[in-house]
Amino acid sequence: MSIQSVYACQIFDGRGNPTLEVDLKTTEGVFRAAVPSGASTGVHEAVELRDGVKYQYMGKGVLKAFENMNKVIAPTPIRENIPVTEQKKIDEFMIKLDGTENKGQLGANAILCVCKAGDPERGVHLYRYIADVAGKAEVVLPVPAFNVL
């Protein structure tokens, strides 16, 4: 199951901040993923690419990541015909494409969106799929996290 098309757009997360949403189309269907930022970020975390234009969403826009996804990232796995179930290959390819230690060129928010399409092919939930890719046999079930308005 290879990637047929990828389309990104800017949406808003639960805090009203812009975030990246990606539709990834395969032979199995269309998979949508959004990568909102955490409330706090650590010094060793991968860079979430933001525009920094103060008059647009107080510098928190993600149009750079959007552009990277649609113009740089999207055409490449399609051209390379990498199956979505080969997550390690996709990850290594994305890291090489970015070329920086902290994912600062393309943005971790753009790179992370590609993971979600691999789990249906294997018939498992996303958290189990990620644990399998990471080599973790034991899984702690996900705990719901949400914002209260």
Image (spheres, rainbow, N blue to C red):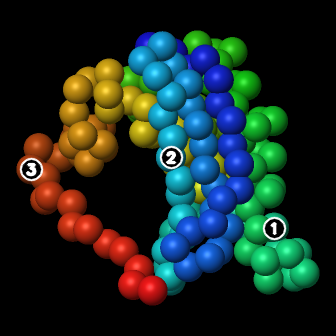
Contact (CB < 8 A) between labels 2 and 3? no
Q: Nearer the viewer, mark 1 or mark 2?
A: 2
Nearer to the camera, 29 or 81:
29
Q: Is residue 13 left or right of residue 71?
A: left
Name the spot of residue 108 as percent of width and height, x first. 59, 55
Name the spot of residue 120 as percent of width and height, x first. 32, 28
- Kindly tell me whether residue 54 is visible in this rendering: yes
Q: Nearer the viewer, mark 2 or mark 3?
A: 2
Secondary structure of residue under mark 3: loop
Find the residue positioned furthest to the bottom.
Answer: 149
For the N terminus, the quadrant is: top left
Of pointers 1 and 2, the one earlier in the residue sequence:
2
Label 1 environment density (alpha carbons within 10 Å; few <14, some 14–19, many ≥20): some
Contact (CB < 8 A) between labels 1 and 2? no
For the C terminus, the quadrant is: bottom left
Secondary structure of residue under mark 2: strand
Using the image, tell me which numbered label, if any, was put on residue 51.
1
Label 2 environment density (alpha carbons within 10 Å; few <14, some 14–19, many ≥20): some
Q: Is residue 101 left or right of residue 143?
A: right
Q: Which residue is mark 3?
A: 138
Name the spot of residue 119 as percent of width and height, x first. 32, 32
Q: Which residue is mark 2?
A: 33
Q: Is residue 60 left or right of residue 112?
A: right
- Kindly tell me whether residue 111 is visible in this rendering: no
The three-letter amino acid code for the residue at tag 3 is Glu
Secondary structure of residue under mark 1: loop
Find the residue positioned furthest to the front.
Answer: 149
Of pointers 2 and 3, the one earlier in the residue sequence:
2
The three-letter amino acid code for the residue at tag 2 is Ala
Name the spot of residue 135 as percent of width and height, x first. 22, 41
